[in-house]
C-alpha cells in the first residue's frame, strides 16, 4: 500500500500538472517572442516552473491564465 500511495502522490503532484501545462491551449508559445534574447518560449518557462515546484507551480500557471483572461 505504501508504494501505491507514493505513485498516486507522484502522479498528482508532478505528472498531471505537467501534462496540463503541455496540452493547455492557453500556455503560450513554445517559441520565444520576436526580439527576445531568451531562447525559450513562455510554455517552456511554465514547464520548468511546474517541474521544479510541482502542484504549487501549476497553481501559479492556472492563476496567471485566469488573471490574463479577466483583466
Image (tube, helix red, strand yellow):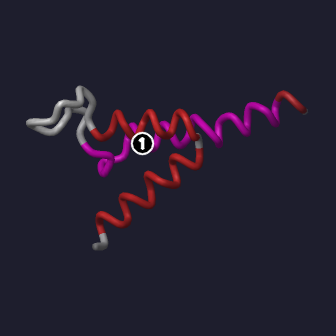
Where in the figure is residue 32, as x and y percent of width and height? 19, 34
Where in the figure is residue 37, as x and y percent of width and height? 18, 31
Picture quadrant of residue 44: top left
* Dot 1 crowding, Cα within 10 Å, few <14, some 14–19, many 20+: many
Residue beneath the point at 52% across and 54% down: 59
Picture quadrant of residue 40: top left
The residue sitting at the right extreme is 1
Q: Is residue 22 left or right of residue 2?
A: left
Residue beneath the point at 57% across and 40% down: 53
Eyeballing the image, is 20 above or below 59?
above
Where in the figure is residue 64, as x and y percent of width and height? 39, 58
Residue beneath the point at 15% across and 39% down: 33
The residue sitting at the front extreme is 37
Pointer 1: what residue? 21
| Residue toward you, 18 or 52 | 52
The residue sitting at the bottom extreme is 71
Q: Quadrant of the N terminus?
A: top right
Which segment did they paint magenta? 4-28
Instruction: Indicate yes or no whether the magenta region holds residue 13.
Output: yes
Q: How many numbered discs, if any?
A: 1
Residue beneath the point at 30% across and 48% down: 25
Q: Is residue 61 left or right of residue 70?
A: right
Q: Main secondary structure of the magenta part?
A: helix
Picture quadrant of residue 66: bottom left
| Residue toward you, 56 or 7 | 56
Instruction: Indicate yes or no whether the magenta region holds residue 53.
Output: no
Circle 1 sits in a helix, a strand or a loop, which is it? helix
Amino acid at each position: 500500500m505504501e508504494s501505491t500511495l507514493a505513485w498516486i502522490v507522484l502522479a498528482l503532484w508532478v505528472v498531471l500538472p505537467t501534462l496540463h501545462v503541455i496540452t493547455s491551449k492557453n500556455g503560450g508559445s513554445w517559441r520565444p517572442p520576436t526580439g527576445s534574447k531568451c531562447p525559450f518560449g513562455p510554455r517552456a518557462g511554465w514547464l520548468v516552473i511546474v517541474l521544479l515546484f510541482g502542484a504549487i507551480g501549476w497553481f501559479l500557471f492556472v492563476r496567471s491564465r485566469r488573471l490574463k483572461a479577466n483583466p
